[in-house]
Image (spheres, grey):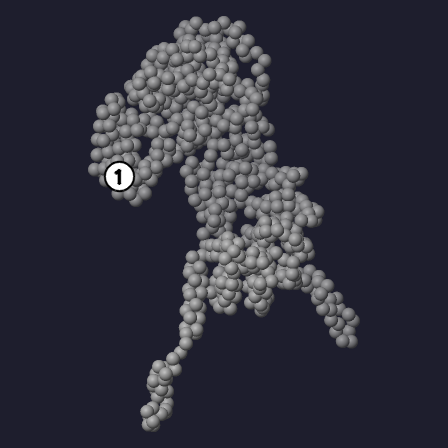
Amino acid sequence: MSVSILGVRHHGPGSARAVRAELERLRPDLILIEGPPEADALVALAPELEPPVALLAHVPGKASSAAFWPFAGFSPEWQAILYGTTAGIPVRFCDLPASHSLAEPEPEVVPEPAPGPEPAPDADPEGLRVDPIGALARAAGYDDPERWWEDVVEHRGDTPFEVIAEAMAAVREGHEPGEREARREAYMRKTLRTAIRQGHDRIAVICGAWHVPALTAPLPPAKADDALLRGLPKVKAQLTWVPWTYGRLASWSGYGAGISSPGWYHHLFTAPDRPVERWLAEAAAVLREEGLPVSSAHVIESVRLAHSLATLRGRPLAGLGEVTEAARAVLCEGDDLAVELIQRRMVVGDRLGHVSDGTPMVPLQRDLREQQRRLKLKPEALDREFGLDLRKPLDLDRSRLLHRLRLLGVEWGVLGQARGKGTFRETWTLQWRPEFDLALVEAAALGITVASAAAQRARDLASAESVTLADLTGLVERCLLADLPEALPEVLAALSAKAALDTDVTHLMAALPAMVRAHRYGDVRGTSAEGLAVIVRSMLDRICVGLPVAVTGLDDEAAAALLSGVDAVHTAVALMSEEPTGPSPEAPQEEAAGQETAAPVVRQASPRSRWLVTLRGVSDRPDLHGLIEGRLTRILLDAGELDDADARMSRAMSRGHAPTRAASWIEGFLGGGGLLLVHDPRLLGLVDTWLTGLDGEQFIDVLPLLRRTFGGFAAPERRAIGERVRSAERAERVGEQDVDEQRAEPAARTVLAILGRARIDGRDHG
């Protein structure tokens, strides 16, 4: 009976090749791999998967209890799994079960940091954290652990497993493992003892190099390990395979046992022959795709430079540092942006794994996969922009799917600013992330399809006790965008009840724009939204009734907040239908002479008319804040409802008002843009006269308000206003100059002679 402990660095291409070669030499009858034993049944699916992939362990109903065990094609564990499944050798996982690790207090919703030779992610907070790779690198005179590992392991033809085991034993001397790490190693030994009792003669164990001394004979007594494992908390965990990305595999993405350059390691594993030449040739191709001129001569010279740097530094092969410096100096010609492109595309990489249809999935995941195929939306790790035309059935279905997923917390698509005008266009940026699978698993209880789950989520949100009026109006809009007619009645009912009880007009003003957009977008998308128009009209009526009270006694901050609400409602009203509807008590009722009284056909004023009448009534009040009064005057002027705007401005800037109030009035009035001053000289003159009439102290008081007002104008507007003021000053200076009649007389007589008969020098000229 023999037990071979192969200590590796997780995600190391050199270790992966060495493990594969060692397994072919040993021909074991059992392979044990560091990982959760609940995943033993999933090992058989490995040949059908396309790495990078990860084992996902989760506790049903608890989104906070989840962990990932990622594998890349160059991971030693993955190569061991492929070898075992191909050769018909049993493969088992030997780490602490996920049912125990997920039951620990305050689990993190981050990839499980267990795998890796570095004990730092393995150690408990109370345990001593040691970086074995860093310690060995320092002992060898290296300041970079990554470079040391590459020189000693990755760039060698074989991995010296015995030497690594001895080195790790030396590093572990005097360092007691933390509680969690001790339990993990105890379970590994327990699994090994069980395999020996079952009669396996040749056992191969693939684990992080840090654990090798703990698994090497002689093993401690079984009773000690049983005592460590006794009474551990336990939960019901479910496991499956999910796609992973190289971006998430990178150490900077939060994965504790990750690596900083997965794309580089993938290249080393797949291109063992002339890796430097192939890497720099691929980098040149990436730069050419972006339109940068890179020739074959650039590639040749960069290869020479990389090898020269490796020789000068005493390295067996040019590493990532050398090829990056060569690419920067030759291919990129010192351009940091081009180097960053190579870093993003190649050093980290954009590879996204794939799992087969036979992989265990919840129905929600399968439904999404089918829709992705039908709608031709392929999950990708890199950002990809999609422009959708909602008049096309395919694009409309795509939009609905993305909006439904957003309701489920799956932000696969980020909605951007659509190009062009119209509500029939959308622009999305799509990027798939591995944690979306966890979100889908957690949402599986809501429904078996994306549509049914999104509808149930909308119902749950609408019935929540803490939901606000703004939340409900936004939810209505999201339901219409996602085409969820089965959820809309309940959401509208909740909205109607909430709006009826909410007496704060600012809440209604904040909620109305989303409702109007929802109604309009629903019409564009062909989505039925019965009852929505009635709620919108009711909310507008209540705003019109409550606004006169809401504008009383406001300070500067409250006035600015209310002003934003007025602007939002004014914009929303412009989107509403102009057709008058409903009964109106003001409508005239006429009777036909000599006939019975006919039923009156009375109509309510249009939303725009109702809103403008309200603003006109409020604008005449003397107790308004200057900011509010100025903006209402501007709105009514632009709408053609005022013909005395100059008189109102003159009153607002009279000496009877404080300069700060006059400045606030100007800020509100000009908030809609400064072109009005360009086209109306009288209004410009009023502002100019008021401003030049301020003394020094008053000017300093109003300067911040004026700078904020005029600073919001576009540069051409400010330039045009300045030209108008300069022209007016020039004309004023000309008009103020005294005229010398004696000097002007010859010119005047000449002009008269040109225009007709005149007497010059006492003689008639015709």
- The answer to which quarter of the image holds residue 136 is top left
Q: Position of residue 207 (x, y in %)?
A: 42, 16
Tag 1: amino acid: Glu
**Residue at point 52% right, 37% down?**
410
Q: Nearer the viewer, residue 344 or 712?
A: 712
Q: Residue at x 53, y 54 (%)?
A: 701
* Residue situated in front as seen by the camera: 204 or 583: 583
Q: Residue at x 32, y 43 (%)?
A: 290
Horizontal and vertical percent position of residue 305: 23, 31
Quadrant where the C terminus is found in the figure: bottom left
Q: Where 548 sits versus 137, above or below? A: below
What residue is shown at x 23% (from left), y 40% (from top)?
295
Badge 1 density bin: few <14, some 14–19, many ≥20, Cα 10 Å: some
Q: Quadrant of residue 487?
A: top right
Q: Is residue 725 visible?
A: yes
Whether residue 705 is visible, yes or no, is: no
Please identify the quadrant where the N terminus is shown.
top left
Nearest the viewer among 577 and 120 is 120
Looking at the rendered structure, the secondary structure element under dot 1 is loop
Q: Nearer the viewer, residue 97 or 728?
A: 728
Q: 148 left or right of 30?
A: left
Q: Which residue is mark 1?
A: 333
Residue 704 pos. (x, y %): 50, 53
Q: Position of residue 366 (x, y in %)?
A: 52, 34
Report the number of numbered marks. Answer: 1
User: Please, is residue 688 above or below residue 739 in the view?
Assistant: above
Residue 686 located left or right of residue 619: left
Q: Can you say whether 455 is above or below 423 in the image? A: above
